[in-house]
Image (cartoon, helix red, strand yellow):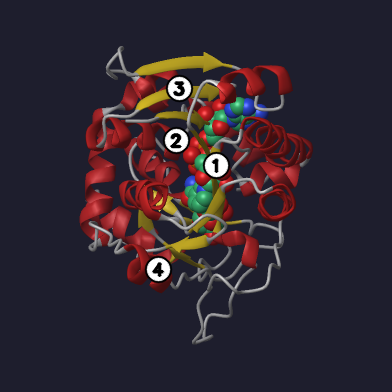
Amino acid sequence: MSKLLVTGGAGFIGSNFVHHVMAHTDDQVVVLDKLTYAGNLASLEGLPENRYEFVKGDICDRELVDDLVSKVDTVVHFAAESHNDNSLNNPEPFITTNLYGTFSLLEAVRAHDKRYHHISTDEVYGDLELDDPDKFHETTPYKPSSPYSSSKAGSDHLVRAWARSFGVRATISNCSNNYGPRQHVEKFIPRQVTNVIDGIRPKLYGQGLNVRDWIHVDDHNSAVLRILEAGEIGETYLIGANGEKDNKTVIELILSEMGQPADAYDHVNDRPGHDMRYAIDSTKLRTELGWQPKYNNFETGLAATIEWYRANEGWWRPQKAAVEAKYAAQGQ
Ligand code: NAD
Ligand code: TDX
């Protein structure tokens, strides 16, 4: 049994990770989360009180972070400003949380010699052409496009520098686009699903030919757990489940699953600098650590996710109107 500090545990992937850890290990978890607009305590309901503790706080608070890190065995760092569109409107919190926040955690794990796992994204590699036969590998050069992805790229570089220069026992994972329960309604799939529930037509940026490599959040989290168990210190692992789909296809699948005509959506303003395609080669994770995804059928995972949003309206309803008003103001 070990004790984990999970940063960003009230967010989408972090909260699913905490539920996953409770179900699959006997570890103790301390969640550190600032509860920004993206954090939701309702995502952590029902956890066993004797194995879980919640601390509201900022990863940039060096004193708090140092104290919490000193009391655990391992840090799993999910906390971030995570939405590309927000980073285009106001990059500052991305720089503060994603860069300074990571620095703050690294200094604490360095001081207390704790194991550290860094959650990152495939967006650090930039984008691929639609017809490129290649995918992203652990050795692909960094070429991030947005304030969000460049702040995540910078945070990855900090981790590698702290590992090499100070011997911090770190691993990094870069995952592709996640879907599943408890994802904020600002993100692509939950936004369209909740739009259809509300009788609003889904909104496709530009022509919608952009490709994302979808993975179910539980598969991301099983990979993170596997890296914590067996990953080699200093190594990076790409996490992906061969889920490439263009955005237009995803909207059509949502509409068809929800009983609407496949063309009942609107084209809206494109995202500035919009990355065209992400695709992950996860061979290293599969061959070296024996990991495999469980959700191999996107349509089935999507149908379950739609069902979750139908059944949990109280979870997302409080955010919906403000998110749509923000998008409407930018023609999206
Ligand atoms: P999210 O926006 O849903 O959750 C982020 C959480 O971090 C929230 O609970 C928020 O309150 C918390 N937080 C933000 N700033 C904080 C601060 N300064 N101090 C403490 N807590 C703070 O994000 P997500 O989609 O769950 O992403 C989690 C991580 O996974 C991020 O590091 C992201 O870069 C990475 N990632 C996400 C995806 C994806 O598809 N969503 C894919 C690959 C990697
Ligand atoms: O309404 C929309 N219409 C639309 O066409 C929205 C919100 C998005 N899109 C497009 C933009 C992207 O091509 O859908 C795609 C997915 O958009 P997002 O959900 O905003 O995700 P993305 O920008 O790809 O980034 C996500 O995956 C990688 C996460 O938000 C990041 O945190 C993660 O690193």
**Which residue type carries mark 2?**
Gly
Q: Which residue has dot 1 on it?
A: 116
Q: Position of residue 37 (x, y in %)?
A: 57, 25
The disc, 2 or 4, on the residue closer to the chain's N-terminal end is: 2
Mark earlier in primary sequence (1, 4): 1
Q: Quadrant of residue 124?
A: bottom right
Marks 2 and 3, how far apart at CA: 12 Å
Which residue is label 2 attached to?
14
The image quarter in which residue 183 lies: top left
Q: Is residue 304 left or right of residue 139?
A: left
| Front residue (pair 303, 81) | 81
Residue 27's x, y, as percent? 33, 29
Disc ID at residue 30: 3
Report if the beta carbon of the residue with label 2 is closer than 8 angstroms to ligand 1.
yes
Which residue is label 4 attached to? Answer: 245
Residue 108 appears anywhere in the view? yes
